[in-house]
Image (cartoon, rainbow, N blue to C red):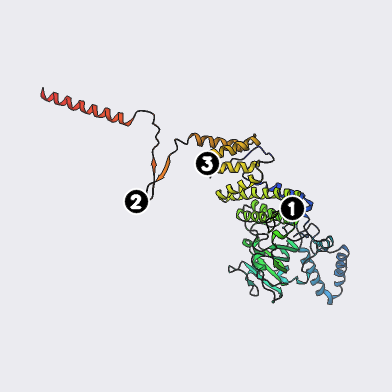
Amino acid sequence: METEPCCEEQRDCVSDPTEPQIADGISELTESNSLTKLPCGPAEEGEELGKKEPSETESHAVESKSTEIKGSANCEQEREKAECKIEKKLRKTNSWKMVRFQDPSTEEDVVERDSSAEILFPEYAVEEWTSTPFEDLFMAEDWENITEDGMLRKKVLEPGDIQVPHSTWGQEVTVKMQGVLEDRTVVEKDCKLVFVIGEGDVIQALEECVMSMQKGEITLLLADSQYAYGLLGREPEIPAWAPLLYQLQLLDIRDKPDPLTLPITDRIRIGNQKRERGNFHFQREEFSLAARAYCVALDVLTTRTKDGDDVGMKEEEEEVREYRIKCLNNLAAAQLKLEQFSEALHTSRDVLTLQPNNVKALFRTGKLLSDKGEYKEAMEVLKQALKLEPTTKAIHAELSKLVKRQSGGQDTQQWRVKPAKVLGDDITPFLIPSKKKSSGISWKFILGALVVALGSLVTSMILTARN
């Protein structure tokens, strides 16, 4: 399939008909207060982790001077100073806000959990968490492998409830977690992260680990970059190919709620979180994960009940419809990147069912129909798109391409397959010559002239012999 031309006219609808407006989608979600009041992010804005109050820092300085005189307390003071340095090294950076999939909490709960300056597991500041090189942890004998390749390992700090079954694929879990780089920079932090295992809400390392944990278990998790953020990393906090170390506690396990039983406001919130995750994957060119996220979002963004009735108010139905259109357009773009052309055509037509004048969907539908050889329908669809966006160069370019295809249709060489009984096992297409007469001198005329010339020469030789 040919690539689509870049559209130079950056209009509201068709800046590039092949690409979803990722930035716009994320900004819309961020600006909507009713949909984005998510509690306790992974790395909230604030001061450094383990940062001491000024009075406490001054007391450390006083103690440092006094220990120079008291030789018996010197070792103790050195240990305290080392611990203070370790705590300060566990500094915090801003982080891309991970999506959460739980009901909005009360303000008191948010305030209680929004303690970004504190370490989430202060009682487990063990050596592995604070200073041990990752290379040593990957080789440590007291760590267990979660995967066979040894690139995902854990060490249990506190066992959980063995009476509760492990979580499984498709269940919803709540975890408290904090993640650091090898220099112990905190890059992820969330005291109540809720996600569904297998839906790509979080990195693979967290999904794999929680399925190996008991409810209540606290563990250290060491993840190679291939189970985290891989080649691209997550700039600016996480560089490319960076392994991560997590402190993780599994707080709760439950079945995923049926979206059809949720209130419409919750469906909109969850659907947009899934769509945002899909946008995140699309920007990273992880198109399969993006398509999966968009499909999950579409399952949630509905006003239907189990009985097939609509339960939303008119305003809610319109809001759900708009978000479905965004998800479908983004899904079609991801399917095009995956070269799933039939699926992309079906998805684009779904958009036109909801919004017949959607220019992106019209453009994609027309282009896919043209590539498929359905020129008449493609022409009608692209003309409709051009009428709505007459200055979009991508539509003009596709129409020009379509006209050339139509005008050259009779001269196009057609391939047909001969029957198997004629060719045996070699089913090879044979070219059927064009019926249009070729220009210039015919090969039959040349052959006839050659025969006449040869006949004249023979006759001349016979007459010469007789004479």
Q: Quick check: 367 above or below 40? A: above
Q: Residue furthest left?
A: 466
User: The disc labelled 1 sits on which kind of residue?
Assistant: Gly
Label 1: how many Cα within 10 Å (few below 14, some 14–19, many 20+) = some
Mark earlier in primary sequence (2, 1): 1
Q: Can residue 181 be seen in this snapshot?
A: no
Q: Secondary structure at mark 3?
A: loop
User: Which mark lies nearer to you, 2 or 1?
Assistant: 1
- Determine which of the numbered discs, if any, sits on residue 312 in the image: 1
Q: Position of residue 465 (x, y in %)?
A: 12, 25
Mark earlier in primary sequence (3, 2): 3
In the rendered image, which quarter is residue 217 located in? bottom right
Mark earlier in primary sequence (1, 3): 1
Q: Secondary structure at mark 1?
A: loop
Q: Quick check: 407 above or below 279? A: above
Q: Quick check: 7 above or below 246? A: above
Q: Position of residue 265 (x, y in %)?
A: 76, 55
Q: CA distance from mark 3 to mark 2?
A: 32 Å
In the rendered image, which quarter is residue 91 located in? bottom right
User: The disc labelled 3 sits on which kind of residue?
Assistant: Glu
Q: Which residue is mark 3?
A: 374
Q: Position of residue 95 (x, y in %)?
A: 73, 56
Residue at point 34% right, 51% down?
A: 421
- Determine which of the numbered discs, if any, sits on residue 175 in the image: none
Q: Secondary structure at mark 2?
A: helix
Q: CA distance from mark 2 to mark 1?
A: 62 Å
Give left or right: position of 407 versus 308. Answer: left
Give left or right: position of 176 versus 8. Answer: right
User: The disc labelled 2 sits on which kind of residue?
Assistant: Lys
